[in-house]
Amino acid sequence: MQNDQFFTRRRMLLAGAAALGAAGTAGAFLASGAGETTETAPAPVAGPQARQALKSSAFRLQPLTGDGPPRAAPRRLKTRREPILRISGRGRNMMLTFDDGPNPHYTPHILDTLAEYDVRAMFFVCGECVVKYRELVARMAEEGHVVGNHTWTHPLLTTLNRKEIRSEMERTSDIIEDTYGERPQWFRAPYGAWNRAAFQLGAEMGMEPMAWTVDTTDWDTPGTDVIIDRVEHGAAPGVVVLSHDAGGDRSQTVHAIREWLPHLLDSGYHLTVPRRRA
Ligand SMILES: [Zn+2]
Protein backbone atom coordinates (compact mmCIF):
# COMPACT_ATOMS: atom_id res chain seq x y z
CA MET A 1 0.00 0.00 0.00
CA GLN A 2 2.75 2.41 0.91
CA ASN A 3 6.31 2.75 -0.26
CA ASP A 4 9.32 1.20 1.41
CA GLN A 5 10.20 4.43 3.09
CA PHE A 6 6.86 4.40 4.87
CA PHE A 7 7.41 0.95 6.28
CA THR A 8 10.96 1.71 7.32
CA ARG A 9 9.70 4.74 9.20
CA ARG A 10 6.94 2.68 10.74
CA ARG A 11 9.33 -0.01 11.90
CA MET A 12 11.51 2.62 13.49
CA LEU A 13 8.53 4.13 15.25
CA LEU A 14 7.37 0.75 16.51
CA ALA A 15 10.87 -0.01 17.75
CA GLY A 16 10.92 3.34 19.49
CA ALA A 17 7.58 2.69 21.16
CA ALA A 18 8.78 -0.69 22.43
CA ALA A 19 11.93 0.89 23.84
CA LEU A 20 9.81 3.38 25.75
CA GLY A 21 7.70 0.59 27.20
CA ALA A 22 4.60 1.93 25.50
CA ALA A 23 3.97 -1.38 23.75
CA GLY A 24 3.40 -2.99 27.14
CA THR A 25 -0.15 -1.65 27.21
CA ALA A 26 -1.09 -3.36 23.94
CA GLY A 27 -3.37 -5.81 25.77
CA ALA A 28 -5.66 -2.93 26.61
CA PHE A 29 -6.74 -2.70 23.00
CA LEU A 30 -8.73 -5.86 23.45
CA ALA A 31 -10.50 -4.65 26.55
CA SER A 32 -13.98 -3.32 25.93
CA GLY A 33 -16.81 -1.95 27.96
CA ALA A 34 -14.56 -1.31 30.94
CA GLY A 35 -14.78 2.44 30.63
CA GLU A 36 -17.43 5.04 31.28
CA THR A 37 -19.40 4.39 28.15
CA THR A 38 -21.94 1.66 27.50
CA GLU A 39 -21.58 -1.72 25.82
CA THR A 40 -21.89 -0.28 22.35
CA ALA A 41 -19.16 2.30 22.90
CA PRO A 42 -16.20 1.97 20.56
CA ALA A 43 -13.42 -0.30 21.69
CA PRO A 44 -10.19 1.37 20.68
CA VAL A 45 -7.58 -0.45 18.68
CA ALA A 46 -4.11 0.50 17.55
CA GLY A 47 -3.63 2.23 14.23
CA PRO A 48 -2.20 -0.61 12.13
CA GLN A 49 -4.81 -3.06 13.46
CA ALA A 50 -7.56 -0.60 12.74
CA ARG A 51 -6.42 -0.24 9.18
CA GLN A 52 -6.56 -3.98 8.70
CA ALA A 53 -10.05 -4.17 10.15
CA LEU A 54 -11.24 -1.33 7.96
CA LYS A 55 -9.92 -2.99 4.84
CA SER A 56 -11.61 -6.32 5.42
CA SER A 57 -14.86 -4.58 6.32
CA ALA A 58 -14.67 -2.47 3.17
CA PHE A 59 -14.28 -5.57 1.06
CA ARG A 60 -17.32 -7.14 2.65
CA LEU A 61 -19.44 -4.08 2.01
CA GLN A 62 -18.22 -3.52 -1.51
CA PRO A 63 -18.29 -6.71 -3.56
CA LEU A 64 -15.76 -6.69 -6.39
CA THR A 65 -18.31 -8.13 -8.76
CA GLY A 66 -21.05 -5.68 -9.69
CA ASP A 67 -23.88 -8.03 -8.79
CA GLY A 68 -24.53 -6.92 -5.23
CA PRO A 69 -26.97 -4.25 -4.11
CA PRO A 70 -25.71 -0.71 -4.73
CA ARG A 71 -25.86 0.23 -1.05
CA ALA A 72 -25.49 -1.94 2.01
CA ALA A 73 -28.45 -1.51 4.35
CA PRO A 74 -27.29 0.18 7.56
CA ARG A 75 -27.80 -1.69 10.78
CA ARG A 76 -30.21 0.18 13.00
CA LEU A 77 -28.72 1.12 16.36
CA LYS A 78 -30.19 1.86 19.76
CA THR A 79 -31.10 5.55 20.02
CA ARG A 80 -28.96 7.43 22.49
CA ARG A 81 -29.95 10.49 24.47
CA GLU A 82 -26.41 11.83 24.77
CA PRO A 83 -23.45 11.69 22.40
CA ILE A 84 -20.35 9.65 23.20
CA LEU A 85 -17.75 11.93 24.79
CA ARG A 86 -14.78 9.61 25.23
CA ILE A 87 -13.46 6.24 24.19
CA SER A 88 -13.56 3.28 26.53
CA GLY A 89 -10.97 0.72 27.40
CA ARG A 90 -7.88 0.62 29.53
CA GLY A 91 -4.50 2.11 28.83
CA ARG A 92 -3.34 5.44 27.53
CA ASN A 93 -5.63 5.54 24.50
CA MET A 94 -6.80 8.75 22.89
CA MET A 95 -8.60 9.51 19.65
CA LEU A 96 -7.95 12.41 17.27
CA THR A 97 -10.83 13.88 15.28
CA PHE A 98 -10.78 16.53 12.53
CA ASP A 99 -13.97 18.29 11.46
CA ASP A 100 -15.44 20.26 8.55
CA GLY A 101 -13.18 19.08 5.71
CA PRO A 102 -11.83 17.91 3.50
CA ASN A 103 -9.95 21.02 2.42
CA PRO A 104 -7.14 21.08 -0.16
CA HIS A 105 -5.07 23.65 1.79
CA TYR A 106 -4.97 21.92 5.17
CA THR A 107 -6.17 18.30 5.02
CA PRO A 108 -3.16 17.02 3.00
CA HIS A 109 -0.72 18.46 5.56
CA ILE A 110 -2.59 16.86 8.43
CA LEU A 111 -2.67 13.53 6.57
CA ASP A 112 1.07 13.84 5.93
CA THR A 113 1.78 14.35 9.63
CA LEU A 114 -0.47 11.45 10.65
CA ALA A 115 1.28 9.22 8.09
CA GLU A 116 4.69 10.30 9.31
CA TYR A 117 3.84 8.97 12.78
CA ASP A 118 1.72 6.03 11.59
CA VAL A 119 -1.36 7.35 13.39
CA ARG A 120 -5.00 6.84 12.38
CA ALA A 121 -7.67 9.48 13.09
CA MET A 122 -11.37 10.12 12.53
CA PHE A 123 -12.42 12.80 10.00
CA PHE A 124 -15.93 14.22 10.26
CA VAL A 125 -16.50 15.46 6.72
CA CYS A 126 -19.19 17.67 5.18
CA GLY A 127 -20.86 16.40 2.01
CA GLU A 128 -20.45 19.70 0.15
CA CYS A 129 -16.65 19.48 0.66
CA VAL A 130 -16.51 15.79 -0.21
CA VAL A 131 -18.02 16.38 -3.67
CA LYS A 132 -15.33 18.98 -4.38
CA TYR A 133 -12.37 17.06 -3.00
CA ARG A 134 -13.22 13.42 -3.45
CA GLU A 135 -9.57 12.46 -3.83
CA LEU A 136 -8.87 13.53 -0.24
CA VAL A 137 -11.56 11.19 1.09
CA ALA A 138 -10.13 8.42 -1.07
CA ARG A 139 -6.74 9.14 0.50
CA MET A 140 -8.26 8.89 3.99
CA ALA A 141 -9.60 5.45 3.08
CA GLU A 142 -6.29 4.39 1.57
CA GLU A 143 -4.39 5.45 4.68
CA GLY A 144 -6.71 3.71 7.13
CA HIS A 145 -8.55 6.68 8.65
CA VAL A 146 -12.18 6.56 9.72
CA VAL A 147 -14.57 8.95 8.00
CA GLY A 148 -17.67 10.16 9.84
CA ASN A 149 -20.74 12.16 8.78
CA HIS A 150 -20.80 15.88 9.70
CA THR A 151 -23.86 16.78 7.54
CA TRP A 152 -23.88 18.26 4.04
CA THR A 153 -23.81 22.04 4.69
CA HIS A 154 -22.87 22.23 8.41
CA PRO A 155 -26.16 23.76 9.60
CA LEU A 156 -27.35 24.23 13.16
CA LEU A 157 -29.56 21.13 13.29
CA THR A 158 -31.73 22.55 16.05
CA THR A 159 -33.08 25.09 13.53
CA LEU A 160 -34.13 22.45 10.97
CA ASN A 161 -37.15 20.20 10.74
CA ARG A 162 -36.82 16.44 10.73
CA LYS A 163 -37.01 16.13 6.95
CA GLU A 164 -34.23 18.67 6.49
CA ILE A 165 -32.04 16.95 9.05
CA ARG A 166 -32.61 13.60 7.37
CA SER A 167 -31.60 15.05 4.01
CA GLU A 168 -28.42 16.63 5.44
CA MET A 169 -27.40 13.33 7.00
CA GLU A 170 -28.51 10.93 4.26
CA ARG A 171 -26.90 12.75 1.34
CA THR A 172 -23.66 12.91 3.27
CA SER A 173 -23.70 9.19 4.07
CA ASP A 174 -24.33 8.51 0.37
CA ILE A 175 -21.39 10.58 -0.85
CA ILE A 176 -19.14 9.06 1.83
CA GLU A 177 -20.11 5.60 0.67
CA ASP A 178 -19.31 6.58 -2.92
CA THR A 179 -15.90 8.09 -2.12
CA TYR A 180 -14.74 6.20 0.97
CA GLY A 181 -16.11 2.76 0.09
CA GLU A 182 -18.53 2.22 2.97
CA ARG A 183 -21.24 4.08 4.80
CA PRO A 184 -20.15 6.06 7.87
CA GLN A 185 -20.71 4.53 11.30
CA TRP A 186 -20.20 7.79 13.18
CA PHE A 187 -22.05 11.09 13.15
CA ARG A 188 -21.15 14.43 14.71
CA ALA A 189 -23.64 17.30 14.92
CA PRO A 190 -22.25 20.66 13.72
CA TYR A 191 -21.40 22.97 16.66
CA GLY A 192 -22.08 20.02 18.97
CA ALA A 193 -25.76 21.02 18.79
CA TRP A 194 -27.63 17.74 19.17
CA ASN A 195 -31.34 17.16 19.28
CA ARG A 196 -33.62 14.15 19.51
CA ALA A 197 -34.13 13.93 15.75
CA ALA A 198 -30.36 13.83 15.17
CA PHE A 199 -29.98 10.94 17.63
CA GLN A 200 -32.95 9.06 16.17
CA LEU A 201 -31.99 9.54 12.54
CA GLY A 202 -28.35 8.72 13.26
CA ALA A 203 -29.38 5.44 14.91
CA GLU A 204 -31.69 4.66 11.99
CA MET A 205 -28.79 5.19 9.58
CA GLY A 206 -26.42 3.02 11.61
CA MET A 207 -24.35 5.85 13.04
CA GLU A 208 -23.26 6.42 16.64
CA PRO A 209 -23.19 10.04 17.85
CA MET A 210 -19.61 11.07 18.59
CA ALA A 211 -18.80 14.27 20.44
CA TRP A 212 -15.43 15.13 22.01
CA THR A 213 -13.67 15.55 25.32
CA VAL A 214 -11.09 18.24 24.56
CA ASP A 215 -11.72 21.14 22.18
CA THR A 216 -8.45 22.56 20.87
CA THR A 217 -10.39 25.81 20.08
CA ASP A 218 -8.46 25.97 16.82
CA TRP A 219 -11.69 27.28 15.23
CA ASP A 220 -10.98 30.52 17.13
CA THR A 221 -7.37 30.72 15.78
CA PRO A 222 -5.95 31.35 19.28
CA GLY A 223 -2.34 30.81 18.16
CA THR A 224 -0.33 27.65 17.55
CA ASP A 225 1.09 27.65 21.09
CA VAL A 226 -2.37 27.81 22.66
CA ILE A 227 -3.55 24.86 20.57
CA ILE A 228 -0.49 22.80 21.53
CA ASP A 229 -1.04 23.70 25.17
CA ARG A 230 -4.70 22.67 25.11
CA VAL A 231 -3.93 19.25 23.66
CA GLU A 232 -1.02 18.57 25.99
CA HIS A 233 -2.90 19.70 29.11
CA GLY A 234 -6.06 17.91 28.06
CA ALA A 235 -4.28 14.61 27.32
CA ALA A 236 -5.62 11.73 29.43
CA PRO A 237 -6.78 8.15 28.87
CA GLY A 238 -10.00 8.01 26.85
CA VAL A 239 -9.84 11.60 25.62
CA VAL A 240 -11.28 12.50 22.20
CA VAL A 241 -9.57 15.58 20.74
CA LEU A 242 -11.46 18.00 18.46
CA SER A 243 -9.53 19.86 15.74
CA HIS A 244 -10.58 21.32 12.39
CA ASP A 245 -9.04 20.81 8.95
CA ALA A 246 -11.42 23.27 7.24
CA GLY A 247 -13.93 26.06 7.86
CA GLY A 248 -11.39 28.90 8.02
CA ASP A 249 -7.64 29.47 8.14
CA ARG A 250 -6.36 26.26 9.72
CA SER A 251 -2.63 26.86 9.33
CA GLN A 252 -2.33 27.02 13.14
CA THR A 253 -3.90 23.56 13.36
CA VAL A 254 -1.46 22.25 10.74
CA HIS A 255 1.56 23.68 12.58
CA ALA A 256 0.34 22.68 16.02
CA ILE A 257 -0.17 18.98 15.24
CA ARG A 258 3.45 18.73 14.08
CA GLU A 259 4.40 19.67 17.65
CA TRP A 260 1.83 18.01 19.83
CA LEU A 261 1.55 14.67 18.00
CA PRO A 262 5.16 13.55 18.66
CA HIS A 263 4.87 14.84 22.24
CA LEU A 264 1.78 12.70 22.89
CA LEU A 265 3.47 9.64 21.39
CA ASP A 266 6.60 10.26 23.46
CA SER A 267 4.36 10.41 26.55
CA GLY A 268 3.20 6.87 25.79
CA TYR A 269 -0.24 7.64 24.37
CA HIS A 270 -1.77 5.33 21.76
CA LEU A 271 -3.82 7.25 19.23
CA THR A 272 -6.60 4.96 18.15
CA VAL A 273 -9.78 4.78 16.11
CA PRO A 274 -12.76 2.55 16.91
CA ARG A 275 -12.85 -1.05 15.87
CA ARG A 276 -15.23 -1.66 13.01
CA ARG A 277 -18.49 -3.46 13.59
CA ALA A 278 -18.67 -6.86 11.96
ZN1 LIG B 1 -18.08 21.34 12.42
Image (cartoon, rainbow, N blue to C red):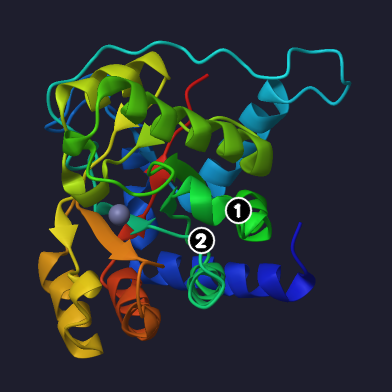
Q: Is residue 274 left or right of residue 161?
A: right
Which of these two is toward me, 84 or 164?
164
Which image quarter: residue 132?
bottom right
Residue at 34% x, 13% y is 77
- Inspect the image, locate mark 2, and give the three-letter code of the amino acid beneath it: Pro
Mark 2 Cα-neighbour bin, 10 Å: few <14, some 14–19, many ≥20: many
Q: Quadrant of ligand 1?
A: bottom left
Estimate the spatial distance between the alpha carbons at disc 1 and disc 2, rounded to whole Å: 7 Å
Residue at 15% x, 80% y is 229
For disc 1, the marked residue is 137
Percent position (x, y) of residue 34? Answer: 18, 28
What is the tally of numbered marks visible in this picture? Answer: 2
Residue at 15% x, 84% y is 226
Any mark on residue 184, and which?
none
In what quadrant of the picture does the N terminus appear? Answer: bottom right
Which image quarter: residue 61?
top right
Percent position (x, y) of residue 262? Answer: 37, 78
For disc 2, the marked residue is 102
Which of these two is toward me, 118 or 216?
216
- Inspect the image, locate mark 1, and give the three-letter code of the amino acid beneath it: Val
Mark found first going from the N terminus, 1 or 2: 2
Q: Is residue 146 left or right of residue 28?
A: right
Q: Circle 2 sits in a helix, a strand or a loop, which is it?
A: loop
Which of these two is toward me, 260 or 200?
200
Residue at 34% x, 61% y is 22
Q: Circle 1 sits in a helix, a strand or a loop, which is it?
A: helix
Percent position (x, y) of residue 38? Answer: 18, 22
Which image quarter: residue 152?
top left
Q: Is residue 13 left or right of residue 40?
A: right
Instruction: Report if residue 157 is visible in the image.
Output: yes
